Amino acid sequence: MSEFVKRTLSGIIFVGCIVTCVLSHFWALGGLILVVCLLAVDEFHRLTGSPRSLRIYAALSTSLLWSVAAFHTYPWMPALGLAYIALLIVCMLDEIWNLSGKPLQNWGNMLISQIMIAMPLCTMLLLESLDKWLLLALFVLIWVNDTGAYCIGTLTAKRPQGNHKMTPHISPKKSWEGLIGGIVFCLLAAYVLAQCGWFDAISAHEHDILVALIFAALTSLFGTMGDLMESLFKRSIGVKDSGHFMPGHGGILDRFDSLLLASPILTAFCWLCYFIAPLL
């Protein structure tokens, strides 16, 4: 089987799994996000050479953090939050006795895995709690942005003078033309989604289009920044892909890198709109 066929088939399965979980039931999505969080965090710790004990702490902490997001409307959520903080403290104190010789590196890796990977991915549960169509819109616009950036970037690269590279030292193929193309594709897609009522939960009817366009612009910009952030991480440790979880697509971090910044930013934006919309 050719690499193109593998990439296409795995991509179709990936998209189908996400769409099915988002549209079916909250706990189907919750289970998927928990698995993604655990795999992504462990992938990060494997790449950075973290000891087994730290990977266990990271898995336990990630599970507790997921519980805080999943049960954020339940009365026992503060207890879960305190347990999460306590476990992080225990993990930090453990470095005093395990004599690993790399306490700063281990502490840094633990905090990075929680703040920059687990927390952003868990915010998808908070976004879904507003409306499942908002979370699906985030995924759709991320995919549209990637497609638009790839198509426009590839076309403009064929010009005699080429295109204008954004960050050649991090991601040589990304261009400013591709960024603009991704934004334009996102704006057009968001307009269509707004017409279908995907943003009704966070906007008064007369402001649907404006909210959708802002949502799309934020998704495109912060999705691209998340992608670049993960590319910089991989380049700093000298690897091409974060893993081999998906044939032709790399690891979990490679597939969800755009959400590392886009998800928390869009979740905050949607909750802000949710509270403001009734006042307009």
Image (tube, rainbow, N blue to C red):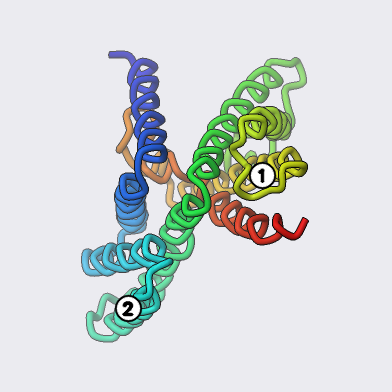
Picture residue at 39% right of the left edge, 17% below the top: 4
* Residue under the point 35% across and 44% down: 25
Which residue is found at the position 66% from the left and 27% from the top? Answer: 192
Q: Earlier in the sequence, mark 2 or mark 1?
A: 2
Asked if residue 213 lies left or right of residue 78, the reply is right
Q: Amino acid at mark 1?
A: Phe
Q: Which residue is mark 2?
A: 83
Q: Secondary structure at mark 1?
A: helix
Cα separation, mark 2 vs mark 1, equals: 34 Å
Asked whether the beta carbons under mark 2 and mark 1 sit within 8 Å of each other, the answer is no
Mark number, residue 131: none
The residue that disc 1 covers is 215
Left or right, residue 227 beside residue 82: right
Task: Quarter of the image for the N terminus: give it.
Answer: top left
Q: Quadrant of residue 80?
A: bottom left
Q: Residue 72 at x, y = what percent?
A: 42, 66
Q: Position of residue 255 (x, y in %)?
A: 43, 39
In this view, the residue in front, 130 or 79, is 130
Other-residue count near label 1 (Cα within 10 Å), few / some / many at <14 / 14–19 / ≥20: many
Residue 97: x %, y % from top left: 23, 85
* Viewer-nearest residue: 238 or 55: 55
Which sits in the foreground, 10 or 33? 33
In percent of width and height, residue 81 lies at 39, 75
The number of callouts visible is 2
Q: In which quarter of the view is residue 219 placed?
A: top right
Secondary element under disc 2, as helix, strand or loop, is helix
Q: Amino acid at mark 2?
A: Ala
Q: Is residue 134 visible?
A: yes
